[in-house]
Image (tube, helix red, strand yellow):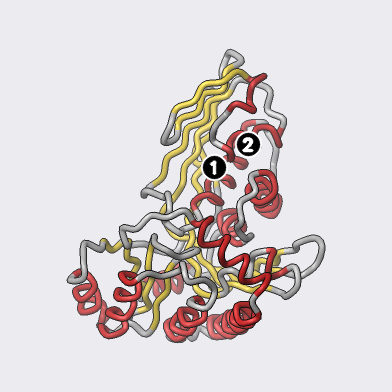
Amino acid sequence: MIITKTPLRITFTGGGSDMPSFFEKHDGHCINATIDKYVYVLVKKRNDNKIYLKYSENELVDTNTIFEIQHDFIRETLIYLGVDYGLEIINWADIPTKGSGLGSSGSFLVGLLNAIHTLEGNHVSKEKLAQQASHIEMVLCGKPIGYQDQYAAAYGGLNEMTFISNEKHEVKVTPLVKKQDELNSISQNLLLFYTGITRESSSVLDDQNKNLMSKEDTINAMKENVDLSKRLAAHLRNNEYQYIGHCLRSNWDLKLKFSDKIVNEDIMKMHNTAIEGGATGGKIIGAGGGGFMMFYVERVRQQVTEGMIKKLGNYKIMNFNIDHYGSRVLLNVES
């Protein structure tokens, strides 16, 4: 029996430039960090030819009818890896992940791949885990997403990612902040609020993809977003963490140009209230339309900012720290 533990992620700048619709023509760049909220996957061999799945639903199929599995990520992963033996797969998470914007689908796929490879006695690099997860989600399942979620889940930490415009879809991952006390000091100045709005990211990303392929204004805004992300990387290398908020503020203005589905009236009101309350910047996490909002607020202003936001509605704050590790095996025992 194998259990893997794979972190979720937040993105600071550059989100969207990891999508092939952009970086097949222009180099992309983003900065993200994994957090101490996790997706768990348990895999265990069975003594029969059945595959049993437990996630938000339950499924039971024979090994020779894997194609009947309704969970597309699990189905395509098992086919891709050539699994032909009885298997039990159970998935759960620290927080409700559907529509959260925290990269949960990438985390699940990386964790699932890590678990099955470990079960079969295969050592697989972080890069290969990320590559395989990206291929399954984007090519085999046809999701209109980018590459950052899978690479963040596999590598962990606070990294800059460069998406190189070549036929290989090459991704370069470089750690920006390595010491845990410095990561803690960054997360202590971040407030993460759940909007209470769940959404399918694909609808937002479909619209953004169309704009990136056809609208010059959107393409130029994404190029500015890439330049902004590179500037923030330089600040982080110099331990100038106070610039995070200013970059989030600029990122917000640019992100509004990607798609008119990214924000609604409630999200806009939350953002503006946080700025009035002392935040130096904020952004919506993930594709947009709901999920989590993140703000950079110095600790002396956090109580005021939090109070002002909570007066708007039943918005819940989620405490977190930045996770230093990517997907890892939590349990490996003979069953």
Front residue of this view, candidates 191 and 323: 191
> Is residue 222 shown above or below 290?
below
In the rendering, at what x and y percent does residue 323 appear?
47, 60
Residue count near mark 2 (Cα–Cα under 10 Å), binned few <14, some 14–19, many ≥20: some
**Residue 247 in view in this figure:** yes
Which amino acid, mark 2?
A: Thr
Which amino acid, mark 1?
A: Val
Front residue of this view, candidates 179 and 11: 11
Q: Element at badge 1?
A: strand
Which quadrant of the structure image shows residue 14? bottom right
From the viewer's perspective, tell me whether residue 221 is left or right of residue 40.
Answer: right
In the rendering, at what x and y percent does residue 214 appear?
67, 72
From the viewer's perspective, tell me whether residue 93 is left or right of residue 214.
Answer: left
Res 188 label: none
> Is residue 182 shown above or below 144?
below
Res 329 label: 1
Name the residue located 53 percent from the left edge and 25 percent from the top edge. 88
Which quadrant of the structure image shows residue 198? bottom left
Q: CA distance from mark 1 to mark 2?
A: 8 Å
Residue furthest to the top: 48
Name the residue located 64 percent from the left edge and 44 percent from the top edge. 141
Name the residue located 26 percent from the left edge and 77 percent from the top edge. 302
Q: Are marks 1 and 2 in contact (CB under 8 Å)?
A: yes
Name the residue located 64 percent from the left edge and 71 percent from the top edge. 212
**Residue 333 in view in this figure:** no
Residue furthest to the right: 167
Residue count near mark 1 (Cα–Cα under 10 Å), binned few <14, some 14–19, many ≥20: some
> Is residue 161 shown above or below 105?
below
Residue position for label 2: 118
In the rendering, at what x and y percent does residue 308 appear?
20, 76
**In the rendered structure, which disc, 1 or 2, sits on the residue that comes first in sequence?**
2
